[in-house]
Image (spheres, grey):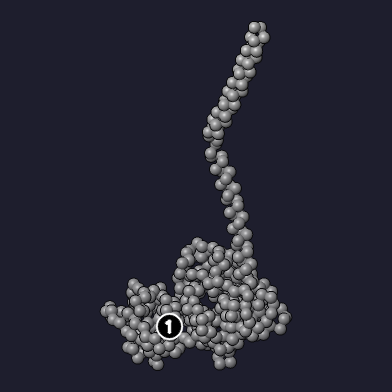
Amino acid sequence: MYIYSQRRRRIKKIIITCLIIIFLILAGIKLYQIYKEIPINDHTTVKVERLSQTVEVKKQEDVTITQMLQNATESVVGISKLKDNGSAIFTEDGVSQMGIGSGVIISEKGYILTNEHVSGAKNSTCYVTSEDGKNYNANVIWSDSNLDLAIIKINMKCVSYASLGDSDSIKVGESVYAIGNPIGFEFQRTVTSGIISALNRTIIFKENEQTSEGLNNQENEREVYMSNLIQTDATINPGNSGGPLINNNGEIIGINTVKITSAEGIGFAVPINVIKPIIQKLENDGTFEEASIGIFAYDREVIPYLDSNIDFDTGIYVAQISMDSPAFTSGLQIGDIITKIDDNNLEKMCDLREYIYSKNIGDTVTLTVLRNNRERTVSVQLSRK
Protein backbone atom coordinates (compact mmCIF):
# COMPACT_ATOMS: atom_id res chain seq x y z
CA MET A 1 0.00 0.00 0.00
CA TYR A 2 2.80 2.35 0.90
CA ILE A 3 4.63 1.56 -2.37
CA TYR A 4 1.44 2.14 -4.33
CA SER A 5 0.90 5.55 -2.72
CA GLN A 6 4.49 6.54 -3.37
CA ARG A 7 4.16 5.61 -7.01
CA ARG A 8 0.98 7.71 -7.36
CA ARG A 9 2.73 10.75 -5.90
CA ARG A 10 5.63 10.29 -8.33
CA ILE A 11 3.29 10.04 -11.34
CA LYS A 12 1.39 13.06 -10.11
CA LYS A 13 4.63 14.99 -9.77
CA ILE A 14 5.64 14.01 -13.32
CA ILE A 15 2.25 15.06 -14.67
CA ILE A 16 2.46 18.42 -12.86
CA THR A 17 5.99 18.95 -14.18
CA CYS A 18 4.85 18.18 -17.72
CA LEU A 19 1.92 20.56 -17.36
CA ILE A 20 4.26 23.30 -16.10
CA ILE A 21 6.58 22.72 -19.06
CA ILE A 22 3.65 22.79 -21.49
CA PHE A 23 2.39 25.98 -19.83
CA LEU A 24 5.80 27.62 -20.09
CA ILE A 25 6.06 26.65 -23.77
CA LEU A 26 2.61 28.03 -24.51
CA ALA A 27 3.35 31.17 -22.51
CA GLY A 28 6.61 31.61 -24.43
CA ILE A 29 4.81 31.28 -27.77
CA LYS A 30 2.18 33.79 -26.66
CA LEU A 31 4.82 36.29 -25.45
CA TYR A 32 6.69 35.94 -28.78
CA GLN A 33 3.52 36.70 -30.71
CA ILE A 34 2.81 39.71 -28.51
CA TYR A 35 6.41 40.92 -28.95
CA LYS A 36 6.13 40.70 -32.74
CA GLU A 37 3.08 42.94 -32.65
CA ILE A 38 4.73 45.65 -30.57
CA PRO A 39 5.14 48.73 -32.93
CA ILE A 40 8.68 49.90 -33.53
CA ASN A 41 9.42 53.59 -34.18
CA ASP A 42 8.35 53.80 -37.84
CA HIS A 43 9.69 57.31 -38.25
CA THR A 44 13.23 56.25 -37.43
CA THR A 45 13.08 53.22 -39.73
CA VAL A 46 11.70 55.20 -42.70
CA LYS A 47 14.19 57.98 -42.15
CA VAL A 48 17.14 55.61 -42.20
CA GLU A 49 15.82 53.81 -45.28
CA ARG A 50 15.20 57.05 -47.17
CA LEU A 51 18.61 58.42 -46.26
CA SER A 52 20.23 55.23 -47.44
CA GLN A 53 18.16 55.26 -50.62
CA THR A 54 18.97 58.92 -51.35
CA VAL A 55 22.70 58.37 -50.97
CA GLU A 56 22.54 55.29 -53.21
CA VAL A 57 20.57 57.07 -55.97
CA LYS A 58 22.85 60.11 -55.94
CA LYS A 59 25.90 57.90 -56.13
CA GLN A 60 24.40 55.99 -59.07
CA GLU A 61 23.47 59.26 -60.81
CA ASP A 62 27.02 60.60 -60.48
CA VAL A 63 28.41 57.41 -61.99
CA THR A 64 25.86 57.55 -64.82
CA ILE A 65 26.64 61.19 -65.71
CA THR A 66 30.39 60.52 -65.62
CA GLN A 67 30.06 57.48 -67.88
CA MET A 68 27.67 59.33 -70.18
CA LEU A 69 30.11 62.23 -70.63
CA GLN A 70 32.99 59.85 -71.25
CA ASN A 71 30.99 58.13 -73.98
CA ALA A 72 29.83 61.44 -75.46
CA THR A 73 33.33 62.90 -75.76
CA GLU A 74 34.42 59.92 -77.87
CA SER A 75 32.13 61.09 -80.67
CA VAL A 76 33.44 64.69 -80.66
CA VAL A 77 36.08 65.59 -83.26
CA GLY A 78 38.25 68.56 -84.08
CA ILE A 79 37.76 70.29 -87.43
CA SER A 80 40.11 72.62 -89.27
CA LYS A 81 40.03 74.26 -92.68
CA LEU A 82 43.79 73.77 -92.88
CA LYS A 83 45.49 70.43 -92.49
CA ASP A 84 46.99 69.76 -89.07
CA ASN A 85 50.61 68.70 -89.43
CA GLY A 86 50.89 67.64 -85.82
CA SER A 87 52.21 70.95 -84.50
CA ALA A 88 50.48 72.74 -81.64
CA ILE A 89 47.82 75.27 -82.61
CA PHE A 90 47.84 77.79 -79.80
CA THR A 91 48.18 81.27 -81.19
CA GLU A 92 46.09 84.30 -80.38
CA ASP A 93 44.29 84.23 -83.74
CA GLY A 94 44.78 80.56 -84.51
CA VAL A 95 41.11 79.73 -84.22
CA SER A 96 39.97 82.37 -86.70
CA GLN A 97 42.86 81.87 -89.16
CA MET A 98 42.74 78.08 -89.29
CA GLY A 99 39.00 77.69 -88.76
CA ILE A 100 39.54 75.43 -85.78
CA GLY A 101 36.31 74.16 -84.37
CA SER A 102 34.42 71.09 -83.31
CA GLY A 103 32.05 68.53 -84.73
CA VAL A 104 30.18 65.46 -83.59
CA ILE A 105 29.93 62.08 -85.31
CA ILE A 106 26.26 61.17 -85.80
CA SER A 107 26.51 57.92 -87.76
CA GLU A 108 28.73 54.87 -88.07
CA LYS A 109 28.89 55.75 -91.78
CA GLY A 110 31.13 58.74 -91.02
CA TYR A 111 28.66 61.63 -91.10
CA ILE A 112 29.67 64.54 -88.86
CA LEU A 113 27.55 67.52 -87.84
CA THR A 114 29.15 70.93 -87.33
CA ASN A 115 28.79 74.66 -88.11
CA GLU A 116 29.16 75.96 -91.66
CA HIS A 117 31.54 78.66 -90.44
CA VAL A 118 33.78 75.85 -89.13
CA SER A 119 33.73 73.46 -92.10
CA GLY A 120 33.12 75.83 -95.00
CA ALA A 121 30.31 75.74 -97.56
CA LYS A 122 28.98 72.74 -99.48
CA ASN A 123 31.50 70.92 -101.72
CA SER A 124 34.49 72.37 -99.86
CA THR A 125 37.11 70.33 -98.00
CA CYS A 126 38.09 70.36 -94.35
CA TYR A 127 40.16 68.17 -92.03
CA VAL A 128 39.03 66.10 -89.08
CA THR A 129 40.97 64.93 -86.03
CA SER A 130 39.28 62.01 -84.28
CA GLU A 131 39.35 61.07 -80.61
CA ASP A 132 42.26 58.67 -81.14
CA GLY A 133 44.36 61.41 -82.77
CA LYS A 134 44.01 60.25 -86.38
CA ASN A 135 43.49 62.81 -89.18
CA TYR A 136 41.00 62.48 -92.05
CA ASN A 137 40.07 64.45 -95.13
CA ALA A 138 36.40 65.40 -95.09
CA ASN A 139 33.97 66.65 -97.72
CA VAL A 140 31.16 69.08 -96.92
CA ILE A 141 28.10 67.37 -98.41
CA TRP A 142 25.48 69.84 -97.15
CA SER A 143 25.45 73.27 -95.53
CA ASP A 144 23.14 76.19 -94.80
CA SER A 145 24.53 79.63 -93.96
CA ASN A 146 21.26 80.84 -92.42
CA LEU A 147 21.27 77.96 -89.93
CA ASP A 148 25.07 77.90 -89.70
CA LEU A 149 24.95 74.12 -89.95
CA ALA A 150 26.86 71.69 -92.12
CA ILE A 151 27.22 67.94 -92.55
CA ILE A 152 30.60 66.59 -93.53
CA LYS A 153 31.72 63.02 -94.26
CA ILE A 154 34.86 61.03 -93.67
CA ASN A 155 35.52 57.68 -95.32
CA MET A 156 35.61 55.37 -92.34
CA LYS A 157 33.29 53.27 -90.20
CA CYS A 158 32.82 55.02 -86.89
CA VAL A 159 32.41 52.90 -83.77
CA SER A 160 31.52 55.84 -81.51
CA TYR A 161 28.73 58.15 -82.59
CA ALA A 162 26.20 60.27 -80.73
CA SER A 163 22.44 59.80 -80.43
CA LEU A 164 20.01 62.55 -81.39
CA GLY A 165 17.60 63.92 -78.79
CA ASP A 166 14.35 65.86 -79.18
CA SER A 167 14.89 69.62 -79.08
CA ASP A 168 11.12 70.23 -79.13
CA SER A 169 10.68 68.62 -75.71
CA ILE A 170 13.40 70.48 -73.78
CA LYS A 171 12.51 72.91 -71.01
CA VAL A 172 14.15 75.90 -69.34
CA GLY A 173 16.19 74.83 -66.32
CA GLU A 174 17.22 71.40 -67.63
CA SER A 175 20.87 70.45 -67.20
CA VAL A 176 23.00 70.47 -70.34
CA TYR A 177 26.63 69.92 -71.25
CA ALA A 178 28.68 71.55 -74.03
CA ILE A 179 31.61 69.63 -75.50
CA GLY A 180 34.19 71.05 -77.86
CA ASN A 181 37.72 72.24 -78.54
CA PRO A 182 38.02 75.74 -77.01
CA ILE A 183 40.97 77.85 -78.26
CA GLY A 184 42.55 74.91 -80.09
CA PHE A 185 43.31 71.22 -80.04
CA GLU A 186 45.37 71.56 -76.83
CA PHE A 187 42.09 71.70 -74.88
CA GLN A 188 40.22 69.24 -77.05
CA ARG A 189 36.97 67.71 -75.81
CA THR A 190 36.53 70.13 -72.94
CA VAL A 191 33.22 69.59 -71.12
CA THR A 192 31.31 72.49 -69.56
CA SER A 193 27.99 72.25 -67.78
CA GLY A 194 25.02 74.54 -67.30
CA ILE A 195 21.30 74.74 -67.86
CA ILE A 196 18.94 75.72 -70.63
CA SER A 197 18.52 79.42 -69.93
CA ALA A 198 15.87 80.21 -72.55
CA LEU A 199 14.27 78.90 -75.74
CA ASN A 200 13.40 80.40 -79.14
CA ARG A 201 15.96 83.18 -78.85
CA THR A 202 16.70 85.51 -81.77
CA ILE A 203 20.08 87.19 -82.17
CA ILE A 204 21.27 89.72 -84.72
CA PHE A 205 24.88 90.36 -85.63
CA LYS A 206 26.96 91.65 -88.51
CA GLU A 207 29.12 89.32 -90.54
CA ASN A 208 31.79 90.14 -93.08
CA GLU A 209 31.11 88.74 -96.54
CA GLN A 210 33.90 86.76 -98.13
CA THR A 211 35.61 87.58 -101.41
CA SER A 212 36.13 85.03 -104.15
CA GLU A 213 39.59 84.40 -102.66
CA GLY A 214 38.03 83.41 -99.35
CA LEU A 215 39.12 86.55 -97.50
CA ASN A 216 36.84 88.61 -95.30
CA ASN A 217 35.65 91.81 -96.94
CA GLN A 218 35.07 94.28 -94.10
CA GLU A 219 33.49 96.83 -96.44
CA ASN A 220 30.58 94.51 -97.23
CA GLU A 221 28.96 93.53 -93.96
CA ARG A 222 25.63 91.78 -93.88
CA GLU A 223 23.18 91.58 -91.04
CA VAL A 224 22.55 88.03 -89.90
CA TYR A 225 19.39 87.01 -88.07
CA MET A 226 19.48 83.69 -86.25
CA SER A 227 16.24 82.61 -84.62
CA ASN A 228 14.77 79.69 -82.67
CA LEU A 229 18.05 79.27 -80.78
CA ILE A 230 18.62 77.48 -77.48
CA GLN A 231 20.24 79.78 -74.92
CA THR A 232 22.54 78.18 -72.34
CA ASP A 233 24.95 79.29 -69.64
CA ALA A 234 27.26 76.33 -70.32
CA THR A 235 30.54 77.98 -71.30
CA ILE A 236 31.05 78.19 -75.06
CA ASN A 237 34.38 79.56 -76.31
CA PRO A 238 35.96 80.00 -79.75
CA GLY A 239 36.68 76.48 -80.92
CA ASN A 240 33.55 75.09 -79.26
CA SER A 241 31.60 76.00 -82.39
CA GLY A 242 30.11 72.94 -84.03
CA GLY A 243 30.31 70.85 -80.88
CA PRO A 244 27.24 69.21 -79.34
CA LEU A 245 24.99 70.48 -76.59
CA ILE A 246 23.78 67.33 -74.86
CA ASN A 247 21.23 66.42 -72.20
CA ASN A 248 21.57 64.10 -69.20
CA ASN A 249 20.98 61.09 -71.45
CA GLY A 250 23.94 61.99 -73.66
CA GLU A 251 21.67 62.90 -76.57
CA ILE A 252 22.37 65.86 -78.84
CA ILE A 253 19.73 68.57 -78.46
CA GLY A 254 21.66 71.33 -80.24
CA ILE A 255 24.84 72.36 -82.03
CA ASN A 256 26.80 75.15 -80.33
CA THR A 257 27.18 78.11 -82.63
CA VAL A 258 27.75 81.56 -81.04
CA LYS A 259 28.15 83.35 -77.72
CA ILE A 260 27.67 86.92 -76.55
CA THR A 261 31.21 88.25 -76.03
CA SER A 262 30.11 91.27 -73.99
CA ALA A 263 28.56 89.11 -71.26
CA GLU A 264 29.32 85.94 -69.34
CA GLY A 265 27.29 82.77 -69.59
CA ILE A 266 25.22 83.58 -72.68
CA GLY A 267 25.74 81.10 -75.48
CA PHE A 268 23.49 79.70 -78.17
CA ALA A 269 22.90 76.41 -79.97
CA VAL A 270 20.89 75.48 -83.06
CA PRO A 271 18.12 72.96 -82.18
CA ILE A 272 18.82 69.48 -83.51
CA ASN A 273 15.32 68.72 -84.79
CA VAL A 274 15.60 71.04 -87.79
CA ILE A 275 18.26 68.87 -89.38
CA LYS A 276 16.94 65.42 -88.48
CA PRO A 277 15.17 64.84 -91.85
CA ILE A 278 18.46 65.40 -93.69
CA ILE A 279 20.33 62.99 -91.44
CA GLN A 280 17.62 60.37 -91.90
CA LYS A 281 17.77 60.63 -95.70
CA LEU A 282 21.56 60.38 -95.69
CA GLU A 283 21.35 57.29 -93.47
CA ASN A 284 18.71 55.62 -95.64
CA ASP A 285 19.73 56.71 -99.14
CA GLY A 286 23.34 57.86 -98.80
CA THR A 287 22.44 61.12 -100.52
CA PHE A 288 20.36 64.22 -99.98
CA GLU A 289 18.97 66.52 -102.66
CA GLU A 290 17.52 69.61 -101.09
CA ALA A 291 14.07 70.64 -102.24
CA SER A 292 13.15 74.31 -102.11
CA ILE A 293 10.22 76.71 -102.22
CA GLY A 294 12.49 79.63 -102.99
CA ILE A 295 11.68 82.03 -100.14
CA PHE A 296 13.21 83.45 -97.02
CA ALA A 297 10.85 84.24 -94.15
CA TYR A 298 11.24 85.75 -90.70
CA ASP A 299 9.85 84.54 -87.41
CA ARG A 300 7.31 86.73 -85.66
CA GLU A 301 9.90 87.60 -82.96
CA VAL A 302 12.26 89.08 -85.58
CA ILE A 303 9.72 91.41 -87.21
CA PRO A 304 9.92 94.22 -84.58
CA TYR A 305 13.61 94.64 -85.52
CA LEU A 306 12.66 95.09 -89.18
CA ASP A 307 9.38 96.99 -89.19
CA SER A 308 7.35 97.91 -86.10
CA ASN A 309 4.24 98.45 -88.28
CA ILE A 310 4.00 94.75 -89.19
CA ASP A 311 1.89 92.82 -86.72
CA PHE A 312 0.56 89.25 -86.81
CA ASP A 313 -0.21 86.58 -84.23
CA THR A 314 1.02 83.42 -85.88
CA GLY A 315 3.01 82.28 -88.90
CA ILE A 316 6.16 83.46 -90.68
CA TYR A 317 6.65 86.63 -92.72
CA VAL A 318 7.82 86.26 -96.35
CA ALA A 319 10.70 88.72 -96.81
CA GLN A 320 12.43 87.44 -99.96
CA ILE A 321 11.35 85.44 -103.03
CA SER A 322 13.76 84.17 -105.65
CA MET A 323 12.71 85.20 -109.15
CA ASP A 324 13.31 81.73 -110.61
CA SER A 325 11.67 79.86 -107.76
CA PRO A 326 8.39 77.90 -107.61
CA ALA A 327 7.17 80.36 -104.96
CA PHE A 328 7.40 83.20 -107.48
CA THR A 329 5.58 81.32 -110.25
CA SER A 330 2.85 80.19 -107.83
CA GLY A 331 1.98 83.78 -106.99
CA LEU A 332 3.39 84.02 -103.48
CA GLN A 333 4.23 87.64 -102.60
CA ILE A 334 6.60 89.48 -100.28
CA GLY A 335 4.62 90.44 -97.19
CA ASP A 336 2.53 87.27 -97.20
CA ILE A 337 2.28 85.48 -93.87
CA ILE A 338 2.44 81.70 -94.16
CA THR A 339 0.51 80.09 -91.32
CA LYS A 340 0.42 76.45 -92.49
CA ILE A 341 2.08 74.03 -94.83
CA ASP A 342 -0.04 70.95 -95.67
CA ASP A 343 -2.16 71.63 -92.55
CA ASN A 344 0.93 71.77 -90.32
CA ASN A 345 1.04 74.97 -88.28
CA LEU A 346 4.08 77.20 -88.78
CA GLU A 347 5.44 79.30 -85.94
CA LYS A 348 9.08 79.55 -86.97
CA MET A 349 11.14 79.49 -90.15
CA CYS A 350 12.74 76.33 -88.72
CA ASP A 351 9.33 74.64 -88.85
CA LEU A 352 9.16 75.31 -92.59
CA ARG A 353 12.74 74.18 -93.16
CA GLU A 354 12.26 70.96 -91.21
CA TYR A 355 9.16 70.06 -93.20
CA ILE A 356 10.69 70.91 -96.60
CA TYR A 357 13.81 68.85 -95.74
CA SER A 358 11.54 65.83 -95.37
CA LYS A 359 10.07 66.28 -98.89
CA ASN A 360 11.48 65.46 -102.32
CA ILE A 361 12.08 67.53 -105.43
CA GLY A 362 8.87 67.54 -107.47
CA ASP A 363 6.56 67.14 -104.47
CA THR A 364 3.67 69.61 -104.23
CA VAL A 365 2.87 71.35 -100.95
CA THR A 366 -0.07 73.55 -100.04
CA LEU A 367 0.59 76.80 -98.18
CA THR A 368 -2.06 78.60 -96.15
CA VAL A 369 -1.35 82.32 -96.53
CA LEU A 370 -2.64 85.52 -94.97
CA ARG A 371 -2.61 88.47 -97.38
CA ASN A 372 -4.34 91.73 -96.50
CA ASN A 373 -6.00 89.93 -93.59
CA ARG A 374 -7.60 87.43 -95.97
CA GLU A 375 -6.73 83.73 -95.95
CA ARG A 376 -5.94 81.87 -99.16
CA THR A 377 -4.15 78.69 -100.22
CA VAL A 378 -1.23 78.44 -102.63
CA SER A 379 0.05 75.21 -104.20
CA VAL A 380 3.80 75.05 -104.78
CA GLN A 381 5.76 72.33 -106.56
CA LEU A 382 9.19 72.03 -104.93
CA SER A 383 12.27 72.44 -107.09
CA ARG A 384 15.97 71.76 -106.62
CA LYS A 385 17.64 74.41 -104.47
Residue at the left extreme?
374
Residue at 63% over, 18% down: 14
Residue at the top extreme?
1
* Residue 150 position in % (x across, y down): 54, 81
User: Label 1, on which residue?
Assistant: 359
* Residue 199 position in % (x across, y down): 46, 68
State which quadrant residue 337 falls in: bottom left
Residue at 61% over, 18% down: 15
Q: Which of 112 and 178 is in front in this view?
A: 112
* Residue 184 position in % (x across, y down): 66, 76
Q: Is residue 261 something one can see in this rendering? A: no
Quadrant placement of the N terminus: top right
* Residue 165 position in % (x across, y down): 51, 70
State which quadrant residue 133 falls in: bottom right
Quadrant placement of the C terminus: bottom left
State which quadrant residue 191 falls in: bottom right
Residue at the front extreme?
1
Label 1 crowd bin: few (<14), some (14–19), many (20+), radius 10 Å: some
Indicate the secondary structure of the residue bearing disc 1.
loop
Left or right, residue 164 beside residue 131 = left
Q: Is residue 64 above or below residue 216?
A: above
Q: Nearer the viewer, residue 210 or 81?
A: 81
Q: Is residue 158 something one can see in this rendering? A: yes
Q: Which of 197 and 203 is in front in this view?
A: 197
| Amino acid identity at mark 1 | Lys
Residue at 55% over, 34% down: 36
Q: Nearer the viewer, residue 203 or 200?
A: 200
